[in-house]
Amino acid sequence: MMNFRLIKFLVCIGVCCICSSCDENEGDKGLSGNNYLEYVDTRVGTAASIADITVTEVEEPMGYVSPIVGNPSALTHWTPQTAKWTDRVVTVPVPYWYDQEKIQGFRGTRYPNGAVVGDWGPMSLMPMTGEVNIDADERASKFSHDSEVAKPHYYSVQLDDYNIKAELTAAAKTGFFQFTYPESKSSSVVFDGVYVPGHYKVIPEKNEIEGYMVIAGHFRNHFVAKFDKEFDTYTIDLLPNVVDEKLVPNGFKAEYFNNDKLQGKPDVVKNYTKLNYNWLKEPAEGVKADFFSVRFTGIFVARHSGEHSFELTTKDGTRMYIDDQLVIDEWKYRATGTNIHKVNLTKGHEYKIRIEYYDGSSTTEMHLRCAEPVRPDPEMGAKLALEGADGNAVYVTFSTKNQEKVKMKVGTSLIDIAQARANMDEEFPDFDFDKAVTKSSGVWENELNLIQVEGSEDDKSIFYTALTKCFVNPRNLNEDGRYFSPFDYQVHEGQMYTDLSIWDTFRSLHPLWVLVKPEETTNVINGMLNAYEEGGWLPKWPNPWYRSIMMGTHADAVIADAYVKGIRGFDTDVAFESMLKNANEKGNRGFSGRVGIDHFNEIGYVPADVFGFYGEPVARTLEFSYDDYCIAQMAKALGKDDKYTEYMERSKRYINVLDKETGLVRGKKLNGEWLPPFDKSISVWAQGTDHDTEVYYRNHTLLVPHDIPGLADFMGGEDKLINYLDQFFEKDMYYVGDEFSMHAPYMYNSLGTPWKTQKVVRDMLAKYFFNDVGGLPGNDDCGQVSSWYVFGAMGFYPALPGDPVYQLCSPVFNKVRMNVGNGKVFTIIANNNSKENAYVQSATLNGKPYNLCYISHEAILEGSELVFEMGPEPNKAWGTSEQ
């Protein structure tokens, strides 16, 4: 196995600086500062997993992470960009892939690390020498991974084609770059909007560039870039003209279909003079907000002869035809992209244009531009740069001496340009790059010192790299006490977080934050409630607004779990009201809510023949049942006994999609008939081979974390469920890279066989997680997979969010110390621990014998000390006491 912890250490970070930074809050932390950044390599997960992963054809074992730089929960992270898109199983805008050989630039990104959604409002910049090239592929430079240093607070690389050393650090809203150039009369930096054009203005007397990129037509990513060097020249690469009535005299006919396949007759027909629109919800009255399709047709009349360059910016799936010839065929998964087609046309000739658009979820964009073969004014770009203009890119040039360091800060804001400049001035008030790196390292050392572990060097590298990923998202939109709301497009005071992959992260990431970041957990929940007030619903998978993806409304779980574990500081009346709305009302205003909730409440399940395939009917039934359990726990904690009883009854409805014949989940029609066993139409994730389909069914059958006794009864008793689990793990049916059954290894604890949990968890951690670029077993999903590892490696896991109890397993580390606030430290010690000694022989809690396979949240907050004696064989008598 390749050890990926870099021996060379960062940049000018003295341990004394780090410790002094940690000492500022030592009274709160309860732990003294150690240097853990040396163990972190943020490239882990940027390549395909090196483990043998159970994965279906519709997914792949990719971490989908990038070596991002910036504070935890930063408004904007920065990362090297090796690609805009990649042709993999799912085409996603992940900025960095380890197996690619060139760097296109450095992206200010809001891609949710490890997820499969869009990068909203990104920008990129690239230092160069010689002729300026704005095309990302053409300007890209070769580099060697040997020249990289990849830490959460600092990244550096040698751009071989330009002989430039690029270094960057970042805070929450500002990136800080240092480029070491060779001798050149034409050194430069180019800026672009990655997937969309931008509006740029150059202010040469201040050595500044300012501008913004429009995000889905509803708000802007503002930036200010300030250099410590004067510009020699500057220019904007201006946009082509929008295709309007000058080029398409009779406009475009739009035929909308309320399906995503252009099937049947159009449901709505409209006419447009141009295609230059952003739709937040439905594009026209009578058209669905999501999963619709549209055919645009028009006659283009060329005004000139020669090469025309068409630019088509859309989201999701797009095909473009000229005279019935397919010229663009692209699928962008939940994200915006621009495609360019160049073609020779003849003046006065008519050409049929047809664009077929297939919408997925969230917003819709449609922009068609055309650059005609007309010689532009070569001075126009520079002139408009001083006034401010729309463009594909902007760049500045200057001469440099050999090894001259040029520094540049880039402040960002969702509010306005003035706030972007204020953010930059606050976070990095001067051009001292080394001081900025040290400041950023101190922020991250504070984070990593929340949990201190003792064990092998390799295990510590895996652990602290994983812990880093647990603190990247959700994204904090707060700017000096204000935020621009993605839900009503107004500036408010208070808290707002987005890029909440709640379907994934409610399981263990948010419970980890409850333990080590209780105050920020309160802020996150207040942000959710602000989203409810401004948009009408709790967020589900905001990126940055509502997205109609994934099942359930697991904000219910996040809020209930936090409240029953003592998190306060939010309005419980509003919180409970919003949870009840999730459970009883159909979504609207761009929010899908619990799709099928009316059927769930009327007949007790989501019918497969009404909500098949994309509708995930079985999963929704299971997850609605669990969400209702969480609502019941919140009701109980609030003293609402009638609601507790009602929602506990509702939480049993999962039984309606468990089939006695197969012993598994199974789709059920509206009339009560079952779908055929292992029917692939049950879910998009059940596609692929028959084995893939069986993996889906067996994982989903375990999606009942809140009623393991009820699931055991369905199976025919605890022994039958134990046997099911044994076969499940022995036959490698468990998909660790996805979340359906992440709690499954811990179910043994609830079935009186805790030694099996100990063995399975320890084996999985060793099998799937490595200190390697291929060291993640699947999409990290905003830190969920990493948090699953962090908990398992420490020796306990929140198997049932909403219940203030953690299931114990077998710690990887000899000692774990976790700061739990108020100067208290929860300690786990594993004596005689080794890879062979994976079984708990006995335990003490605060010096007293302990024979439970779980521990309460209260005991952890008290700063208890849990001591395990480990051995090579299971002690089947330990951990079986009921209380």
Image (cartoon, rainbow, N blue to C red):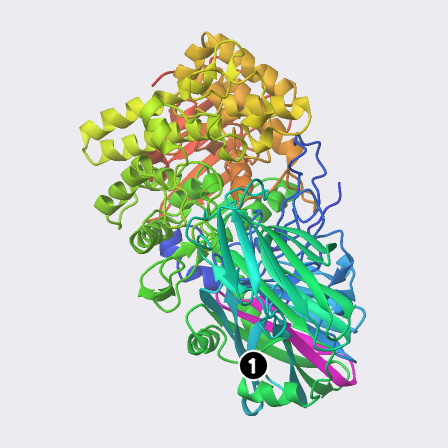
Depth check: give the residue in front, 186 or 332: 332
Q: Is residue 226 above or below residue 514?
A: below
In the figure, is residue 862 to the left or right of 844? left
Q: How many marks?
A: 1
Residue 192 appears at what percent x and percent y?
62, 71
Mark 1 element type: strand
Is residue 194 depicted above or below 512 in this figure? below
Magenta region includes residue 181: yes
Tell whether position 364 is magenta.
no
Q: Nearer the viewer, residue 111 or 768?
A: 111
What kind of secondary structure does the magenta stretch mostly adopt?
Answer: strand
Picture coordinates of residue 419, whole percent (x, y): 42, 75
Q: Residue 846 placed where, x, y %?
A: 37, 31
Along the viewing direction, whichever of 822 and 649 lies nearer the viewer = 649
Q: Quadrant of residue 306?
A: bottom right
Q: Quadrant of the C terminus?
A: top left
Quadrant occupied by the N terminus: top right
Q: Is residue 517 visible?
A: yes
Magenta residues span 168-191
Name the residue located 39 percent from the left edge and 67 percent from the top edge.
479
Left or right: residue 231 versus residue 740 is: right
Q: Is residue 135 visible?
A: no
Of residues 790 and 438, the one nearer the viewer is: 790
Q: Is residue 595 above or below residue 340?
A: above
Percent position (x, y) of residue 122?
56, 64
Please identify the quarter of the rendering in which residue 676 is found: top right
Q: Residue furthest bottom?
A: 205
Check disc 1: other Cα within 10 Å, few if <14, some if 14-19, many if 20+: many
Residue that mark 1 sits on: 389
Amino acid type at image mark 1: Ala
